[in-house]
Image: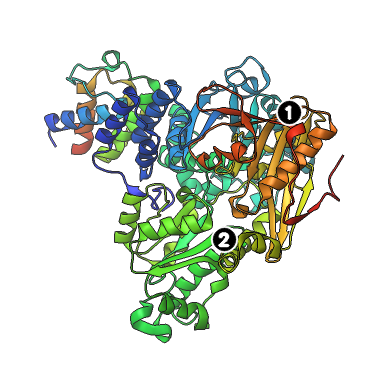
């Protein structure tokens, strides 16, 4: 799965997790850009991504992420490993 | 099976667009409660549950008039964060026909929420509070060195819960639900944990036993979280990573199951649990097709794996009947052929006498289920339909979404497990009445047949009815509360009172309370009516009756008792009120039929009626009235 495909799947997931339809997701999108992205929905976001990509995040991996582009790169690396 | 809620259908691929359609309908004020219920029937993931819960919140914020679903305001207090669980409960409750608004306590302040009258939970005007603490919050997370210290620790945990309940029960009018404590996975001594009283494992077991005693004494409603965790496995229940990072006390994978379990208890409190189990026959109660294979050819009984599996299904159905669930049959067969195993197969556990309504014909099952509900005088939403055939299940779901239709898989050995796991028949009590109910429904069918043979007055006279009137008492309190919370159709005001409120009424001199039992030549009908009248205003607060005794002139008998009491007290008028609900249209003319005059204007569908004591003459009734046990 390449970076663009992962980005597309993340964007799809965000609609479901944050319950918003008109979301434009770019590499730079972060929690600051999405009103519904708070610490609670963040837990569901992480769980949903773990299930979708069949991976497990470590807490410190999540903590360092700045935006969706970073997130896609971590997933990409995990899928390649 | 449990974690995946396998008894539910897979979520539709277009779930989100269906949800958006419901949201649009809410915005335009269309009725949406059945649509919300239908959305919840599938196996939903955490995101879908959360979306559905948000939709419920939006809907309730429009302050909708009463609809077909029951309503609950629920508070939750617990260990760790409840933010995944709370919306999952609101969404799962829809599945059990309860609209729920949820208020969660602040993280880490369970005790303050409970004992501070100004807390978010205490001041929210709740019906129920669910308290789910864990071994850490209850101080049972470390080994005690002696048996005495262990006993003290358990007593301290119990005292903490008692203090919380004492605070909460003044604010939650229908009661407090307490979760049993889930033991941690890790053994300390090994198997010896079960022997050593000071082990965490043993202390938790001791506390849970005390919680069960407390619930038996009606102080609390128990939710057996520990058993659920054991059923799915502690290894799956506890997710150490999620506890450390997000303070989730339950693995997110199991939140849909846990939320459904809470929802079942809400349904039990509100009386939306199911009352009858309708069974298909071929390949559901026995292996094979009776019309093709004959009594000798069907698989049933000891000696073959398939035969034993079907035996187990029948045993489960019989066990349900013994606890008060009514059984019916709905099969595509010639009736005479379908009855053959019940009459002549030596291994049949179920017999004709166990089946309240037996429908076997070649018509479609949705139509037959309507007929079964009508014959039993219960709503379609009280039925569970068990059928091995996915085509039949799909037809019933499409036509009658209010009937519960479990996915039972294709292995008969697992049918009982799937049926039990769905939690359709969750109970809060097991009263003497429950033990007899299935027989009563059957006797009623016989009465109906008998009625066809004579004129009405002669029929009623021939029933040798004896009606027993008495005031509310502690002995019958559980049954009275059950009727108050479950009766929907013949219920003038549909006012619900929890058991503790019923207890308060027993001692309240300003209220005239009556419980009515009816015995006739076919048997004991049990408690068939509950009445509460205010002795100051002489307004009838609650009048409900079992639909099983309709047409028996019981309403005349009840009115005669109320009027006699009013006359004795010197009252001038007795007032009655009809508050329309989605289900009580049958009593809209109740007071008119009894000779009351309407005195209100047209307001919100409610009607108020009055009957002058001076104008009332007690009629001759085709029954004997027994007041020997009536209290003053």
Residue B188: quadrant of the picture: top right
Q: Which chain does the numbered disc 1 sit on?
A: B
The spot of residue B342 in percent (x, y) is 50, 77
Q: Which chain does the numbered disc 2 sit on?
A: B
Residue B541: quadrant of the picture: top right
Tell me if mark 2 has few (under 14), some (14-19) or many (20+) residues whose alpha carbon lies within 10 angstroms of its own: some
* Towards the viewer: A58 or B520: B520
Residue B391's label in the rendered image is none
Of callouts 1 and 2, the N-terminal one: 2
Does residue B187 appear to the left or right of B34 in the view shown? right
**Which residue is depicted at the point 34% across and 33% down?**
B47
Above or below, B60 relative to B587: above
Above or below, B532 relative to B54: below
* Towards the viewer: B458 or B244: B458
Does residue B502 appear to the left or right of A9 in the view shown? right
How many marks do you count on the picture? Answer: 2
**Which residue is depicted at the point 63% across and 61% down?**
B440
**Which residue is depicted at the point 57% across and 18% down?**
B120
Tell me if mark 1 has few (under 14), some (14-19) or many (20+) residues whose alpha carbon lies within 10 angstroms of its own: some
Residue highlighted by disc 2: B320
- The answer to whether residue B308 is seen in the rendering is yes
Q: Secondary structure at mark 2?
A: helix
Q: Are marks 1 and 2 in contact (CB under 8 Å)?
A: no
The spot of residue B15 in percent (x, y) is 28, 38
Residue highlighted by disc 1: B573
């Amino acid at each position: 799965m390449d970076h663009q495909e992962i980005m597309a799947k993340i964007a799809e997931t965000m609609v479901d997790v944050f319950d918003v339809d008109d979301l434009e997701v770019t590499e730079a999108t972060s929690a600051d850009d999405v009103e519904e992205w708070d610490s609670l929905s963040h837990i569901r976001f992480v769980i949903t991504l773990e299930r979708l990509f069949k991976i497990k995040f470590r807490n410190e991996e999540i903590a360092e992420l700045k935006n969706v582009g970073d997130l896609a790169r971590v997933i990409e690396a995990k899928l390649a490993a | 099976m449990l974690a995946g809620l396998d008894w539910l259908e897979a979520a539709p691929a277009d779930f989100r667009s269906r949800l958006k359609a419901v949201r649009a309908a809410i915005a335009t004020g269309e009725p949406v409660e059945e649509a919300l219920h239908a959305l919840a029937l599938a196996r939903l993931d955490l995101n879908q549950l959360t979306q559905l819960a948000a939709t419920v919140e939006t809907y309730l914020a429009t302050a909708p008039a009463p609809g077909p679903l029951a309503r609950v305001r629920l508070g939750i207090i617990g260990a760790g964060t409840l933010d995944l669980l709370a919306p999952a409960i609101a969404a799962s409750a829809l599945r059990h026909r309860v609209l729920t608004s949820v208020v969660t306590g602040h993280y880490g302040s369970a005790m303050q929420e409970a004992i501070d009258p100004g807390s978010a939970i205490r001041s929210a005007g709740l019906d129920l509070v669910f308290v789910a603490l864990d071994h850490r919050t209850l101080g049972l997370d470390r080994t005690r060195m002696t048996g005495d210290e262990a006993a003290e620790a358990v007593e301290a945990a119990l005292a903490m819960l008692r203090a919380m309940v004492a605070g909460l029960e003044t604010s939650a009018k229908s009661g407090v639900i307490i979760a049993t404590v889930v033991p941690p996975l890790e053994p300390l001594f090994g198997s010896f944990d079960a022997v050593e009283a000071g082990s965490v494992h043993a202390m938790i077991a001791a506390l849970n036993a005390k919680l069960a005693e407390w619930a038996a004494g009606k102080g609390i409603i128990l939710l057996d979280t520990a058993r659920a965790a054991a059923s799915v496995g502690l290894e799956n229940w506890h997710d150490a990573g999620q506890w450390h990072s997000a303070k989730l006390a339950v693995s997110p994978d199991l939140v849909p199951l846990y939320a459904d379990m809470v929802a079942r208890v809400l349904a039990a409190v509100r009386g939306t649990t199911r009352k009858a189990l309708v069974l298909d026959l071929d390949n559901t109660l026995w292996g094979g097709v009776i019309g093709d294979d004959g009594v000798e050819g069907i698989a049933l009984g000891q000696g073959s794996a398939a035969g034993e599996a079907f035996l187990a299904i029948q045993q489960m159905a019989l066990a349900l009947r013994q606890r008060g669930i009514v059984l019916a049959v709905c099969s595509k067969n010639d009736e005479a052929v379908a009855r053959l195993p019940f009459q002549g197969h030596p291994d049949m556990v179920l017999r004709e006498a166990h089946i309240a309504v037996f429908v076997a014909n070649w018509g479609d099952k949705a139509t037959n289920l309507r007929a079964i509900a009508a014959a039993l005088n219960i709503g379609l939403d009280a039925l569970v339909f068990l059928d091995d055939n996915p085509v039949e299940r799909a037809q019933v779901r499409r036509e009658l979404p209010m009937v519960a239709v479990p996915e039972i898989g294709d292995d008969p050995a697992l049918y009982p497990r799937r049926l039990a796991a769905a939690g359709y028949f969750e109970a809060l009590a097991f009263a003497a009445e429950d033990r007899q109910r299935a027989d009563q429904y059957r006797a009623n069918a016989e009465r109906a047949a008998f009625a066809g043979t004579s004129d009405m007055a002669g029929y009623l006279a021939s029933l040798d009815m004896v009606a027993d009137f008495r005031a509310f008492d502690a002995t019958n309190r559980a049954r009275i509360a059950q009727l108050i919370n479950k009766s929907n159709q013949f219920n003038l005001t549909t006012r619900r009172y929890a058991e503790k409120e019923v207890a308060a009424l027993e001692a309240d001199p300003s209220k005239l309370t009556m419980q009515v039992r009816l015995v006739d030549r076919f048997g004991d009908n049990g408690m068939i009516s509950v009445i509460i009248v205010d002795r100051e205003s002489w307004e009838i607060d609650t009048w409900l009756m079992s639909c099983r005794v309709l047409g028996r002139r019981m309403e005349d008998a009840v009115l005669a008792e109320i009027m006699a009491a009013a006359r004795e007290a010197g009252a001038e008028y007795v007032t009655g009120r009809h508050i329309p609900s989605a289900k009580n249209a049958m009593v809209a003319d109740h007071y008119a039929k009894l000779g009351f005059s309407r005195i209100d204007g047209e307001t919100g569908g409610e009607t108020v009626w009055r009957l002058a004591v001076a104008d009332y003459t007690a009629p001759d009734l085709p029954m004997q009235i027994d007041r020997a046990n009536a209290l003053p």
